[in-house]
Amino acid sequence: MCSEGLRERYVNPYTDFAFKLLFGTDLNKEILIGFLNALFDGKQVIEDVTYLNTEHLGSKETDRRAVFDVYCENEKGEKILIEMQRGEQQFFKDRSIYYATYPIREQAIKGEIWDYELKAVYVIGILNFALDDVSSSSFRHEVKLMDTTTHEVFFDKLTFVYLEMPKFHKTEQELDTLFDKWMFVLKNLARLMERPTALQERVFNRLFEAAEIAQFSKENLYAYEESLKVYRDWNNVIDTAIQKGIAKGMEEGLVKGMEEGIAKGMEKGIAEGEWMKAQTIAGNLKNAGLSIAEIAKVTGLSEDEINSL
């Protein structure tokens, strides 16, 4: 039974617990396979996946540890790494490339002659933010090693797919492809109270069953609540940082504006003071009988200004 603190019918897939429950367990393998086949859109068809250890150490004890959200291989031995990135990270691209080195290095055959042939590696990043350095309005980015002269794929066994969730804006009535439907579910699942009419494919049967909070065991409900708390705390931290940044920027802008205003005011005041001083001198010289041309030369005023005195 759902606790009083939870009013949603379905889990929030951006929480660590929910994402791994839906995509990282043998019980829900069908969900992961359905998502990946929709993502690849016929470029390859996955029949089965085997979940692999998500925690990885380097070749030495001093190497940094890497923990993946979901890590598996398909029936052809190709490695698939999936990361749900909940908040913006300055070097997210760097991290995803660093993570890709693990499934690459693990393919080395130890103690035998190895010709360096690799199985394909796919790194999929589901991002709950928009990438700052990507100007395209597209929410899906597929990245491979490319020859910059010919613009042809140079190596097709390493693929990065980034999904910028904030850029996906389709409504239920606008869902054209199966992949659109998956994106819609990922973005809106926690807000849904009923299964959308457009999502009638069999794979979604399992997803909505697994995602229904009311069906959780007491242990799973507690784990989800804790994960949801961490997610909300994280969002609060991000929101607070953003608001502080805006406030600081406004404050600095105000101070800078005041400083610039004072400086301009002083500059203007000095200029006006010099002009008044020049007028006084010009008037005295005019009364003394000097010519207009001579007075203009001494004071820097124009002849029209001197004549008006």
Image: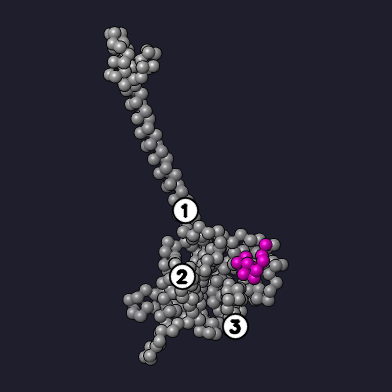
Which amino acid is tagged 2? Met
**Label 3 crowd bin: few (<14), some (14–19), many (20+), radius 10 Å:** few
Q: Is residue 263 visible?
A: yes
Task: Check residue 242 in the rendering and tell me which mark sits there, or answer none.
Answer: 1
Q: Quadrant of the N terminus?
A: bottom right
**Earlier sequence position, callout 3 versus callout 2:** 3
Task: Check residue 146 in the rendering and tell me which mark sits there, or answer none.
Answer: 2
From this viewpoint, which residue is outermost toward the right? Answer: 197
Q: Is residue 76 above or below residue 98?
A: below
Q: Where are the magenta residues, as a range? A: 174-184
Please provide percent x and percent y for residue 58.
37, 78
SS category of the residue bearing label 2 = strand
Q: Quadrant of the C terminus?
A: top left
Which amino acid is tagged 1? Ile
Q: Nearer the viewer, mark 2 or mark 1?
A: 2
Q: Is residue 237 left or right of residue 298?
A: right
What residue would you read off at disc 3?
A: 47
The reply to whether dot 1 and dot 3 touch (C-beta < 8 Å) is no
From this viewpoint, which residue is outermost toward the bottom? Answer: 112
Q: Is residue 236 visible?
A: no
The reply to whether dot 3 and dot 2 touch (C-beta < 8 Å) is no
Its colouring scheme is: one colour
Q: Is residue 126 magenta?
A: no
**Earlier sequence position, callout 1 versus callout 3:** 3
SS category of the residue bearing label 3 = loop
